Amino acid sequence: MTKTVYILNGPNLNLLGKRQPEIYGHDTLADVEAVCAELGEKIGLKTRLLQSNWEGQIIDWIHEARDAAQGIIINPAALTHTSVAVLDALNTFDGPVLEVHISNVHQRESFRHHSYVSQRADGVIAGFGVEGYALALRRMGRLLA
């Protein structure tokens, strides 16, 4: 049976490739989705990539994942640093959770150095550009094997 991984993306990631390309690069979220779908198929995982600018929608998808997915990869974007609610929702999920950041948040503004999500994440990948999603998916494949 193929295992499903939700790949959740927070605020402003719909503008990936257009917003601050000097920080986030030129790849779009559609590019990330295609890479993840192809890699997922190769390693035996079904991927569902979702993005919302709304905290409540991210939380609803985490709740949905409790029954529909075996793992979560999340780039919570700015919610990383502000959302106890996302952390609380992730704490209700029994499978592995991996946190991804496109930029190296530790080289940026000091408010970006704290992550609520890291308190739940089984691993954190930061600073590898959009390649971080593929790295996380490969790791998720091993965690779910």
Image: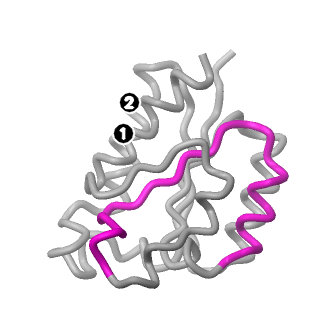
Q: Which mark is residue 43?
A: none
In the rendering, at what x and y percent does residue 120 appear? 68, 53
Q: Nearer the viewer, mark 2 or mark 1?
A: 1
Residue occupying image coordinates x 66% and y 38%: 96
Q: Check disc 2 and report the residue beneath it.
A: 39
Residue at the spot 50% in from the left edge and 61% down from the top edge: 75
Residue at left offset 71%, top offset 38%: 69
Q: Nearer the viewer, residue 86 or 15?
A: 86
Q: Quadrant of the C terminus?
A: top right
**Residue 113 x %, y %:** 44, 73
Residue 70 location (% of width, % of height): 70, 33
Assess disc 1: are there few (<14), some (14-19) or many (≥20) residues with their C-alpha within 10 Å of its C-alpha: some
Secondary structure category for the residue under label 2: helix
Q: Is residue 92 left or right of residue 53?
A: right
Q: Is residue 7 above or below residue 69?
A: below
Residue 138 left/right relative to 141 = left
Q: Specify the label residue 134 is tagged with.
A: 1
Q: Earlier in the sequence, mark 2 or mark 1?
A: 2
Distance between the alpha carbons at the discs numbered 2 and 1? 7 Å
Measured from the top left, where is residue 107 in percent x and y? Answer: 27, 72
Q: Where is 88 relative to 128, above or below?
A: below
77 and 46: which is toward the camera: 77
Q: Which residues are magenta?
A: 83-108
Q: Secondary structure at mark 1?
A: helix
Q: Residues within 10 Å of mark 2 (few under 14, many from 20)?
A: some
Front-most of residues 86 and 12 = 86
Q: How is the image coloured?
A: one colour
Residue type at mark 1: give it. Answer: Ala
Residue 17, image quadrant: bottom left
For the residue marked with disc 2, what is the amino acid?
Leu
Q: Are marks 2 and 1 in contact (CB under 8 Å)?
A: yes
Taking the spot 30% from the left edge, 64% from the top edge, the residue there is 104
